[in-house]
Amino acid sequence: MIGIGMSYFKKSLYTVMKVPEFALTDQNSKKITDKDMLGKVYLVEFFYSRCPTICPVMNSNMKYIDEQINNPDFGIISISIDPTNDTPEVLKNHAKMIGAKSPNWHFLSGDRDYIGNLADMFDIYVGDKEDDSESLNHSGMIALVDKEGNLRCRFDENNMPILYYSGLNYEDEAGTKTSLKGKYHPDREKLIEDIRKLLK
């Protein structure tokens, strides 16, 4: 029985919650909502285009995942936490600069309070905009959403749901020490595997 249980945890994906409702404007000045993404497996990240540290790493890992999946039923939602600077025009240039070619990769901006509340609903950390030293801080976590609009994740080695995936790079293969120049990105491979499961 134990073997069967372990096999289940390895193969199945946990349902965390329904994706929070959202309506924001993408790099083509088009309104994108959670309803528009139904029928697609997609990732959600919070970032900003001027970020000099983890955002380029996250965007690079997103681009790699998108190229590996290469499926019209896959998408990416990148939500800016710096919408005053990140206008649709700026985000369009950013998408071009990083080589984001998929029509399903939406770089979104809107009202900063709305975006902060949305991050809270996703339970992904974004700094308080009223705190100058914290306002552009954010985590490198990525949410995985299935075709029905459910947040999904895999189980860890202790059979606990991981909830979110890391978009960062690491110094070590096990993913215990983050590094901007790290050559390991274990969660990137996990995401590719789990996205393929959800696309089947």
Image (cartoon, rainbow, N blue to C red):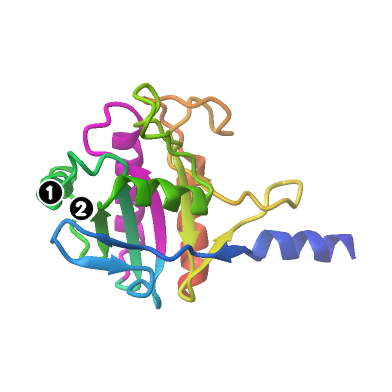
Q: Residue at x 32, y 69 (%)?
A: 71
Question: Which of the pair 79/59 is nearer the observer?
Answer: 79
| Rendered location of residue 102, percent (x, y) | 22, 62
Q: How would you rate the neighbour count of disc 1 (Cα within 10 Å): few for under 14, some for 14-19, many for 20 or more?
A: few
Question: Which of the pair 159/82 is nearer the observer?
Answer: 82
**In the image: residue 62, left or right of residue 89:** right
| Rendered location of residue 64, percent (x, y) | 32, 49
- For the magenta stretch, what is the residue range? 42-71
Residue linked to disc 2? 100
- At mark 1, the secondary structure is helix
Q: Amino acid type of disc 2?
A: Ala
Residue contact between numbered discs 2 and 1, judged by CB atoms under 8 Å: yes
- At mark 2, the secondary structure is loop
Q: Residue at x 37, y 75 (%)?
A: 35
**Which residue lies most toward the top here?**
133
Residue linked to disc 1? 96
Position above or below: 74 against 63: below
**In the image: residue 73, left or right of residue 25:** right
Is 142 in the magenta? Answer: no
Label annotation for residue 154? none
| Rendered location of residue 187, percent (x, y) | 50, 45
